[in-house]
Image (spheres, grey):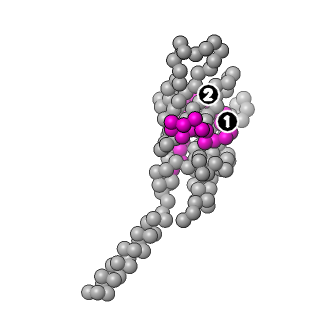
Amino acid sequence: MEKLLALMTLTFLATSSFAENIIVYSSAYTDLAHDCKWQYLEKNLQEGQDNALICKGAGEYEALIDFSMDDSYLHVLKTNTVAFTISTDIRLADYKKGKIEWRLANEKPFAIITRTKLGAKKTLLSIHGLHGFDVLSATANNNANARTIADKFYDSNIKR
């Protein structure tokens, strides 16, 4: 009986520490057509001032889309702060009906994937790391490839 109890205890300890090291990757999405609202009322804008969109994000992040001429640029902020977490402006391909994919590791956001403009007609998927993973900046030609790049980067840069 004691041997069985010891074996059960060892099995529990082994599976518990193994479970702590498992990373579950998933995605959350921001639908730019439905999950965003104008930052300012039109009547509060000064002449020539462009409005911006604030969009719900994932975890403690939100998205800010601002406009310049014919382009829209995405910035990622930690909720209720003014500090941008991605230093480069992300030139969105379509702010009216596009999506932001938030890559999550154990339900915590670590990167975003967006469709970005490269020229007048060419677009590409852009992958950017969030706080703590901000050196991640890559491109991909399909969603599965973009997710793989983000997940491998996370896996190779976390401390277990």
Residue 34 percent across, percent down from the top left: 47, 29
Residue 107 percent across, percent down from the top left: 46, 51
Residue found at the very far left of the displayed protein? 1
Q: Is residue 145 magenta?
A: no
User: What is the three-letter code of the residue carrying label 2?
Assistant: Asp
Number of marks in the rendered image? 2
Residue visible at 51% across and 54% down?
Answer: 105
Q: Residues within 10 Å of mark 1 (few under 14, many from 20)?
A: some
Q: Quadrant of residue 51?
A: top right
Residue visible at 44% across and 70% down?
Answer: 17
Does residue 122 appear to the left or right of 65 in the view shown? right
Q: Quadrant of residue 124?
A: top right
Please state which of residues 13 and 25 is positioned toward the viewer in this rendering: 13
Residue 115 percent across, percent down from the top left: 62, 38
Write the start and end of the magenta stretch as one range.
Answer: 76-104
Measure how far apart labels 2 and 1 are at the Cα level. 10 Å
**Quarter of the image with the C terminus in it:** bottom right
Q: Secondary structure at mark 2?
A: strand
Does residue 122 appear to the left or right of 146 in the view shown? right
Does residue 11 appear to the left or right of 112 in the view shown? left
When the figure is inspected, residue 142 is found, relative to residue 15, above or below; the finding is above
When the figure is inspected, residue 148 is found, relative to residue 45, above or below; the finding is below
Q: Which residue is the site of mark 2?
A: 66
Residue 131 percent across, percent down from the top left: 59, 48
**Quarter of the image with the N terminus in it:** bottom left
Q: Determine if residue 89 is in view.
A: yes
Report the disc number at residue 89: 1
When the figure is inspected, residue 41 is found, relative to residue 53, above or below; the finding is above
Q: Residues within 10 Å of mark 2 (few under 14, many from 20)?
A: some
Residue visible at 61% across and 35% down?
Answer: 75
User: What is the three-letter code of the residue carrying label 1?
Assistant: Asp
Q: Main secondary structure of the magenta part?
A: loop
